[in-house]
Image (spheres, rainbow, N blue to C red):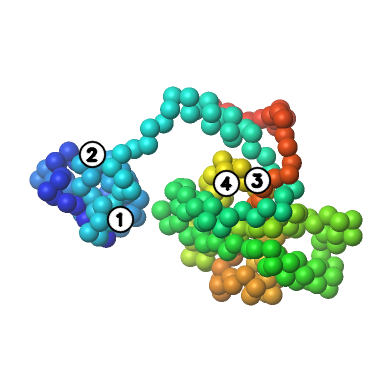
Amino acid sequence: MININYDKCIGCLKCVDKCVCGAIFDNGGKPDFNRKYGCIKCFHCAAACSENAFLWGDKPAIINEEMPVIEETFGDDLKSFLMSKRSIRNFSDEIVPMELIKEALEIAAWAPSAKNQHPVKYVVMTEETIGKAMDIIVKTLEATGACPEILIGLKKGVNMVFAKAKTVIMAYCKANAINPLQDTALALDYASLYLHSKGVGSCWAGYLKDFASEIPELRELLGLPEGAKFHGCMLIGYPTEEYYYIPDRIKKADIQVK
């Protein structure tokens, strides 16, 4: 539960203004909690408090006492960084360290989430599990006749499900998630951008997302809980592809101001 250290609080009441759900109010010049309004633990109050007076239980509700310094050129650098990112399907044999993957998924917790719910959970598939999953998918497609293009591609040496990835991040939400599609997309995008900054390429895997939720053997292999569903799957690895330019985007933003 969020608490206030009144020995530090100077009564500026910035937290009252920043509270998005009205859970903090002015109680005679000092902030106080109205618990019935349902604090969503977004920590806007802690981020806006210059005195670090907010606690999570009995510990500070912030990571550190100083905001990172953002250089003036960061905006231009970020623009170039985002425009340089491409979907990667050809990966080298070098395995992405699991510690780096875990770090990227921890950073994904800072992505926006409906009502600060953060319902996204992850399964990281390694090479052995990918092989087992592909066997299940092939068996299912052969039995059902679905997605014939995948089997045709395999005969040509093209894997349309996993490409050449040796690691895959699977993201799922349980049935009680408020906005699972949006939350998953934002979280995985945060993770993929961080991985991109570390030289790791990524690509969304649409076929796999559907198969992993619908094929019982795959659900069991990946330990998907009852009622849960995969909403995003991302192939990751070190790219063998090289790009020398940023190509033009044929379909640009369609913007109307009314």
Q: How far across and how far down the image is residue 133, in percent?
A: 72, 68
Residue 72, by quadrant, is top left
Residue that mark 2 sits on: 50
Q: Earlier in the sequence, mark 2 or mark 4?
A: 2
Which residue carries the number 3 mark? 201
Q: Residue furthest left?
A: 28
Q: What kind of residue is marked 1?
A: Cys
Q: Which label number is shown at residue 39?
A: 1
In the image: residue 7, left or right of residue 222: left
Report the residue at 62% width, 46% height from top: 200
Residue ID for mark 4? 195
* SS type, badge 4: helix
Mark-to-mark CA distance, 2 and 3: 39 Å
Looking at the rendered image, the disc whose residue lies closer to the viewer, 2 or 3, is 3
Q: Earlier in the sequence, mark 4 or mark 3?
A: 4
- How crowded pointer 3 is (Cα within 10 Å; few <14, some 14-19, many 20+) is rated as many
First along the sequence among labels 1 and 4:
1
Q: Residue at x 85, y 59 (%)?
A: 154
Mark 1 → mark 2, Cα distance in angstroms: 20 Å
> In this orientation, which residue lies closer to the viewer: 143 or 60?
60
